[in-house]
Amino acid sequence: MRGEILSVGTELLLGQITNTNARYLAERLAAAGVFVYHQVTVGDNPERLRAVYAVALQRADVVIATGGLGPTYDDLTKEVLADVLGVQLVQDEEALATLRGWFAAKGVAFGAIQEKQTMKPDGAELLPNPRGTAPGVLWQRGGQLVALLPGPPNEMRAIFEASVFPRLRGASGEHLVSRRLRIAGIGEAAIQERLSDLMAAENPTVAPYAKLAEVELRISARAPSDAAAEALLGPVALEVRRRLGYHVYGEGDEQLHDACGKALGAAGLTVATAESVTGGLVAERLTRVPGASAYMRGAAVVYALEEKERQLGIDPQRIGDGVSAELALEMARAVKERFSAQVGIATCGFAGPDGRQVGLSYIAVAGALGEKVRELRAHGDRQEIRERIAQAALSLLWERLQRKE
Amino acid sequence: MRGEILSVGTELLLGQITNTNARYLAERLAAAGVFVYHQVTVGDNPERLRAVYAVALQRADVVIATGGLGPTYDDLTKEVLADVLGVQLVQDEEALATLRGWFAAKGVAFGAIQEKQTMKPDGAELLPNPRGTAPGVLWQRGGQLVALLPGPPNEMRAIFEASVFPRLRGASGEHLVSRRLRIAGIGEAAIQERLSDLMAAENPTVAPYAKLAEVELRISARAPSDAAAEALLGPVALEVRRRLGYHVYGEGDEQLHDACGKALGAAGLTVATAESVTGGLVAERLTRVPGASAYMRGAAVVYALEEKERQLGIDPQRIGDGVSAELALEMARAVKERFSAQVGIATCGFAGPDGRQVGLSYIAVAGALGEKVRELRAHGDRQEIRERIAQAALSLLWERLQRKE
């Protein structure tokens, strides 16, 4: 099946917002076995909107449009679609009653603007919106499917997942299933070397995407059913995990701090961080995880040189210019003591932009997981360097938690 | 002038990457006085690419295409453009010599792949690429302009700014100049109330965009020259600043921590933070700023309840369940003392996702800027709540630095 994604909105044409809806829908249509050949963005002008719809209906089996459905919006999407389909715009009485009830329950006045939201091209179906008031619209005839969805991403996604995706998957007869393995502590080149035969295969495909100081490996299989696709995918994912070992820290949207948090919780270990160059970023990441209080004691951000002595009791002679392997290790040891944690984590380094040796940094772990310090030469701008150092510190913690070196 | 943006790449159609190039170009074309009516994304298929070019050349004066110019890429962009224009693809001898020299200087072998990069449709011009090897292509005839640019955003932007934008601006005769004022500590509704007359005007336009716990106000003026546009824009920006006062903390990409850092530096004040719910985020933001060591002493992240006593010496009776106005103020006072800073900043609260009163939080400032504590009911998911609290803490610091309440 051929797909086309239409995005409606002047703010997209003016470049005021990035079109994240198109990306989301493209990925999901691929997963449903729909091949997207065109994505088109157009404004609220009825002539141009009509022309874009007409072309899309001519060349695609599946047309998904976003934007132009809000209550106060200068929207024409439904009117134009009805026009192109050659049908009338009619009131959906059931949806109208539901919306009236919703407004009454909230004690909000119901007006003509809201009434407009329950109109639909004759023969179409309104799709409930669990996140807002504007329903989606679905029109199906002769193997062709058109869906209109609101522009706000959370509303668009909720309606798409509940009411559009299942029908697409049922219609296409081809299922694409993907898994994303998340990998840290090993570079893209080394991954390619270890997985070159898997990466040369056509189904499942295995492709690495470099992220900041980590790699996402996407494994995708196509088959006539989810179960068949999973059956192709499973052994390859297992083989990747076998070859990369603990470097695969998680799947999907899981982040390295989530994996560390989970592992710390499972091991019943508590941590504290001593941070100079990262300014609290390692602690901030470790506390993003729900339930972080089970393992997180706290952090000493010792940004000023003297605070390394004052807060952590480090001998001034060992502080030097504030960046050394010895200092990082001392910081990790000291913060562990000061916060009565079982594991201490520390960072120091030069984040720039000015000065010599920008990017040179040290990360250390001390305590119940043994002692380990590592030198890093991080690149990028100031914030990128700081993020790379924090990621390296979590990566070191993760390694120690896996007890493999 | 009418514009159209074409994005070429299978990875866009599959939703593997977000189309940030289209947004960038849309914004810049608007600034050059070119009205973008369509954005189209298409894959590397020659038939579909040819059709998309033909339509674009029919309906637009300015066509900017990105993607499909790399050396190893499965690219056809130039071939297809030549075909649609009805001209031959020819070698640019000068560009070939330059690229050969570049490779020789680097000691890298020069092959057929590289030679292909210096081909161009007959009559077109190659645009130098300061960030990579693939040059851009510019074709102009009879008031129509077509530019092909490489897909990597940094290369695309460098070529566009140096070689395309100046010609567009010269051709359109209309200049759009924008300024973005950044506003914190006041909501969108209150801003609209204070600026309703300015927001109703047509030139300059004044429009607010809600961001996380702040608002960006975009003021845009159109005129025949930059100077004339600036002359329209200046008085409106001044009037906005007069009405919103210190709530306008900066312009463009400046962030609230940048503004606070600058103001702390100017005032010669040092700070330290005591953080519970934000886990180090306030300190992390304050140390993102280059030169942060001039004002930043450090932070005590006292995540575990007992650490509030152990690290900051707070009376356990005042700690309670770890969330109160009194506790926030005590934390701000204590951390100021412990780090010998002139100003202490503190946060405590419930970030969820579980438990009662999720979002309830307190932020405090103590020391040389006076004492102030504020209650906040932050909404969103766990990380959004933490970010809102950190932003509110910086906003409170900013207010105190402006000495206006």
Image (spheres, coloured by chain):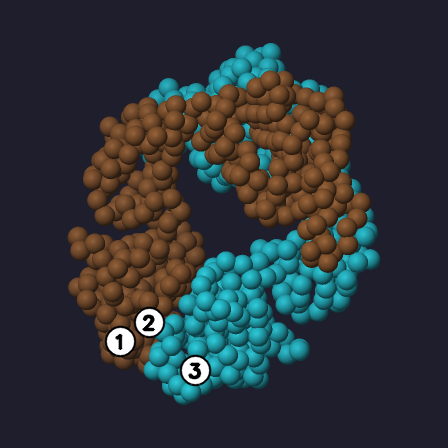
Chain colours: A brown, B cyan
Instruction: Evaluate whether label 3 is on the same chain as label 2.
Output: no
Q: Residue at x 57, y 58 (%)?
A: B212
Tell me which amino acid carries mark 2: Arg
* Residue B333 locus on image (x, y percent): 47, 84
The residue carrying mark 3 is B319
The residue indicated by pointer 1 is A340
Tag 1 near tag 2, CB within 8 Å: yes
Relative placement, left or right, of B381 versus A323 is: right
Q: Nearer the viewer, residue A296 or B120?
A: A296
For discs 3 and 2, the disc positioned in front in the rendered view: 3
B280 sits to left or right of B385: left
- Which amino acid type is shown beneath numbered disc 1? Ser
Position above or below: B289 against A89: below
Determine the chain carrying the residue at label 3. Answer: B
The residues bearing labels 1 and 2 have C-alpha atoms spaced at a distance of 8 Å
Image position, residue B22 (x, y; %):
58, 36
Camera-side residue: A103 or A149?
A103
The chain identifier of the residue carrying mark 2 reads: A
Q: Secondary structure at mark 2?
A: strand
- Residue type of the residue flagged with mark 3: Ile
Q: Nearer the viewer, residue A329 or A175?
A: A175
Please give the residue where the numbered disc 2 appears in the rendered image: A297
Residue drawn at x 30%, y 30% is A231
Give coordinates of residue A291: x percent, y percent: 37, 63
Say which label, 1 or 2, has the lower sequence index: 2
Residue B318 visible, this orientation: yes
